[in-house]
Image (cartoon, rainbow, N blue to C red):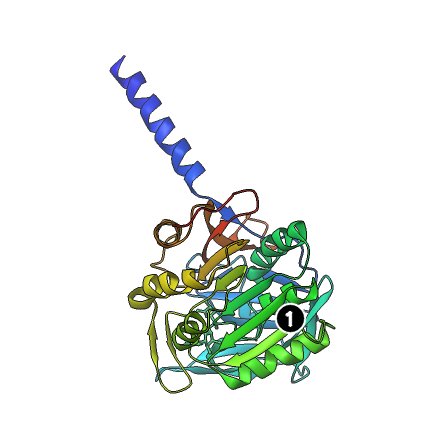
Amino acid sequence: MRSVLYSIIIFLANYFALCYNFFVQTEKWTDYEIIASGNGEKLERWGSVYLLRPDPQAIWSPPFDLSSFPKLNAVYERSTTGGGKWRTLRSFPSEWTVSYGEISFLIKPMGFKHTGLFPEQAYNWDKMSELILKRGGRPKILNLFGYTGGASVALAKIGARVTHVDAAKNMVERCKQNAELSKCPADGIRYIVDDCNKFVAREIKRGNTYDGILMDPPSYGRGPNGETWKLEDNISALVEQTAKVLSDNPLFFLINSYTTGLQPTVMENILKIHLPQGNVEAYEVTLPTSDQRGVRLPCGCSAMVSYSDVVSDGV
Ligand SMILES: C[S@@+](CC[C@H](N)C(=O)[O-])C[C@H]1O[C@@H](n2cnc3c(N)ncnc32)[C@H](O)[C@@H]1O
């Protein structure tokens, strides 16, 4: 009897553990694909260009030797002294475009193994777009740590008026190029090169508000004047401050992070503490792979509070 009870408890524990593992992913990419991953690397197709680059999460064994993939164009090789560089195996354009539905992005292998786009974020673009389209009109959106503008372009394309903030001038330039490539409305994006903390403080003073806010901060970062950003130390205070520029009729507030220690529940708690009550969701963002073993690639976590069917009554 005791052992039956024990088995039931173990079964229920496993069942709830599985339910708790809440992940999301977009299946809609056609120009982007993860062919396979393993041994700390991922093999990706960006349009017709194949790249192999490090991914510290891919600690499992690959289905085949990724570096011997016949179509491989370039591989990012880590240096023993830190950093690394791209090594070309088969020639390919210095930059090219990939499309996601109606929007397009410039792709270029860059330093820090970057390519200029985080394709897994398409899930969040679609989620925010749905709320904007449901509300209609031209809501004001604030995109902090906006990088090359994946989210800014996706939301401006459907009519939102986006303020895109990033400390790096070249990233903001890249966002402009992506917006032009995607034929976003000319007044769709306001481009700001600034430190996110400082920008938010100024917006509070000016009394400016936004209907939707998103932020995708790195683990460590620098503002244009060397201002330091450390995620674990700064995220809660930044969310608290940024909550002050959310409009009285808000749509959403989204935070995303790649930082491994920042679990969905941590993000969910930060949102619950600092934002007006709404529908809170927190999830692991993943990407599907073409690996027949059913491997999904973890790409960080997001938490979102949305207000589509909630009447807000303050914090
Ligand atoms: C690459 S995105 C983050 C995407 C992803 N979460 C990651 O960690 O790689 C980070 C962006 O934040 C910007 N950034 C870093 N510190 C910043 C700061 N203090 N103020 C504004 N932007 C900053 C960087 O220029 C970069 O474009």
Residue 267 placement (x, y as % from top left): 38, 54
> Taking the image as drawn, is residue 143 in sight?
yes
Quarter of the image for residue 73 reads: bottom right
Q: Is residue 195 above or below residue 300?
A: below
In percent of the image, x 50 and y 77: which residue is there?
76
In percent of the image, x 42 and y 71: which residue is there?
200
Q: Is residue 71 above or below residue 94?
A: above
Quarter of the image for residue 11 reads: top left
Residue lying farthest to the top in this orientation: 1
Residue lying farthest to the left in this orientation: 2
The amino acid at mark 1 is Pro
Q: Is residue 278 above or below residue 17?
A: below
On the rendered structure, is 63 left or right of 10?
A: right
- Which of the two residues, 196 or 104, is positioned nearer the viewer here? 196
In percent of the image, x 47 and y 45: which residue is there?
278
- Which of the two residues, 78 or 99, is positioned nearer the viewer here? 99
The residue where tag 1 is placed is 70
Residue 144 placement (x, y as % from top left): 48, 70
Is the shortest distance between ligand 1 and the CB of mark 1 under 8 Å?
A: no
